[in-house]
Image: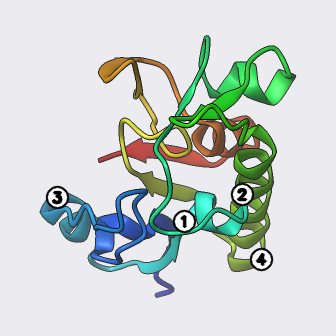
């Protein structure tokens, strides 16, 4: 029996890819990955941003709005990183398609990976990140951790 391929936010499996140079190791994500072939990705790194890097937020709406061009992503220094997050989302989608992944486990509260929540002004709000929105739009099931 083939094991399903699952895209996973690299920080959730213990890789130090977060904006602050740390990980977000998740026991629940690791448990959910049992019996799968996990493919760790960091959309922000794939989009050309460094680690560590300034934190960033979607300025209005959510990742869906960034995909349509009606919102931007700005870092804490006022730099527009929208293009980086869009490029990273495209690269994650490309990896998912190459690997045959039908599902992704993503880090909540992230402007890239948030599935049900992102942060704005330091507060968690309802919404999806750019990568989560693109994967979902492309038919890949997304699950937040």
- Coordinates of residue 18 in the picture (x, y in percent): 39, 61
What element does badge 3 sit on? helix
Asked whether the viewer can see residue 33, the reply is: no
The crowd level at tag 4 (other Cα within 10 Å; few <14, some 14-19, many 20+) is: few
Q: Which residue is mark 2?
A: 88
Q: How far apart, in angstroms, are the residues tagged by discs 3 and 1?
A: 19 Å
- Coordinates of residue 78 in the picture (x, y in percent): 63, 31
Q: Are marks 4 and 2 in contact (CB under 8 Å)?
A: no
Instruction: Decide which of tag 2 and tag 3 comes sooner along the chain.
Output: 3
> Which numbered tag is attached to residue 98?
4
> Which numbered tag is attached to residue 102?
none
Image quadrant in which you'd find residue 47: bottom right
Q: Residue at x 38, y 49 (%)?
A: 107
What element does badge 4 sit on? helix
The crowd level at tag 2 (other Cα within 10 Å; few <14, some 14-19, many 20+) is: many
Image quadrant in which you'd find residue 36: bottom left
The crowd level at tag 3 (other Cα within 10 Å; few <14, some 14-19, many 20+) is: few
Residue nearer the viewer, 58 or 6: 58
Q: How far apart, in angstroms, are the residues tagged by discs 4 and 2?
A: 15 Å
For residue 46, above or below residue 73 = below
Q: Residue at x 66, y 31 (%)?
A: 73
Q: Which residue is mark 3?
A: 28
Instruction: Decide which of tag 1 and tag 4 comes sooner along the chain.
Output: 1
Q: Residue furthest bottom?
A: 1
- Coordinates of residue 84 in the picture (x, y in percent): 75, 51
Q: Which residue is mark 1?
A: 42
Q: Are marks 1 and 2 in contact (CB under 8 Å)?
A: yes
């Amino acid at each position: 029996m083939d094991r399903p391929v699952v895209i996973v936010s690299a920080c959730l499996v213990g890789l130090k890819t977060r904006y602050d140079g740390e990980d977000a190791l998740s026991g629940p994500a690791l448990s959910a990955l049992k019996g799968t072939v996990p493919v760790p990705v960091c959309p922000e790194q794939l989009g050309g941003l460094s680690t560590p890097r300034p934190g960033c937020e979607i300025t209005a709406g959510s990742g869906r709005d960034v995909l349509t061009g009606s919102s931007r992503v700005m870092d804490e220094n006022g730099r527009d990183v929208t293009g980086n997050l869009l490029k990273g989302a495209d690269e994650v989608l490309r990896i998912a398609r190459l690997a045959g992944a039908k599902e992704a486990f993503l880090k909540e509260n992230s402007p890239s990976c948030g599935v049900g929540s992102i942060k704005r002004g330091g507060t968690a709000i309802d919404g999806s990140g750019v990568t989560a929105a693109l994967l979902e739009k492309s038919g890949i099931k997304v699950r937040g951790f």
